[in-house]
Amino acid sequence: MPIPPFVAELRRLVGTLELWLPAVTAVVLRERAGSQEVLLTRRADNDEWAPVTGILDPGEEPAVGAAREALEETGVEVSVDRLASVGASPQVVHGNGDLGVYLDLTFACTWVSGEARVADDENTDVRWWPVDALPPMSDWLRERIDDVLAGETAARFRR
């Protein structure tokens, strides 16, 4: 679902004005043949690779939202292991002209089960990438992956 119902309702009231929304990033990792892989999606709106991202539903616990987004977008079940970082996205201009800035909570997640696949209309491709051979992506999305790969136990706070 590209636009959650509560955001669609807000948009009816405020049009394309910038919204500040809570969001999650699920950086999903797995071990395969002795190397670590990260699950990435190729977004339908901008054709760019990204980790799993999404807007939290009103009242939704962030870790629950990260697991939900991973399942909805890629068809995989994950364990949400830890909060890796907290930060804000740059202003995003969506294809329809809507403006948004997202308070992002990035979670380190581990693949549990399921075959990775395109499971929604937000993405055109889903695949596992070796962590040392990631495709090009926005710096601010790559930072989220780096935050998880750092393996720190305390969350990073972007300043």
Image: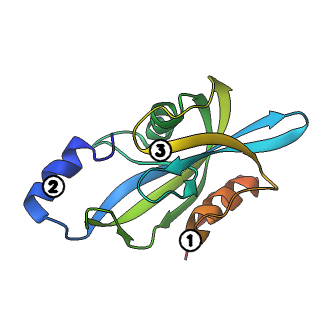
Single out the mark in the foreground, 3 or 2: 3
The residues tagged by marks 3 and 1 sit, at their Cα atoms, a distance apart of 27 Å
Residue 100 percent location from the top left of the image: 32, 66
Residue that lies at the very extreme toward the left in this rendered image: 13
Q: Disc count in the image?
A: 3
Q: Secondary structure at mark 3?
A: strand
Q: Which quarter of the figure is the C terminus placed in?
A: bottom right
Amino acid type, residue under disc 1 in the picture: Arg
For mark 1, what is the residue? 158
Residue drawn at x 25%, y 70% is 18
Q: Quadrant of the N terminus?
A: top left
Q: Which residue is mark 3?
A: 123
- Residue drawn 26% across and 67% down? 97
Viewed as shown, does residue 32 lie left or right of 91? right
> Residue 4: percent from the left, percent from the top?
27, 44
In this view, 34 is above or below 42: above
Which tag is nearer the camera, tag 3 or tag 1?
Answer: 3
Taking the image as shown, residue 23 lies to the left or right of residue 96, namely right
Residues tagged 3 and 2 counted as in contact (Cβ below 8 A): no
Residue 152 seen from this side: no
- In three-dimensional space, the C-alpha distance between marks 3 and 2, rounded to whole angstroms, equals 24 Å
Residue at mark 2 = 10
Disc 1 is placed on an element classified as: loop
Choose between 102 and 128: the one closer to the eye.
128
Residue 155 found in image quarter:
bottom right
The residue at the point 57 percent across, 54 percent down is 50
Q: Position of residue 81 (x, y in %)?
A: 64, 39
From the viewer's side, name the closer residue of 108 and 113. Answer: 113
Q: Position of residue 65 (x, y in %)?
A: 43, 39
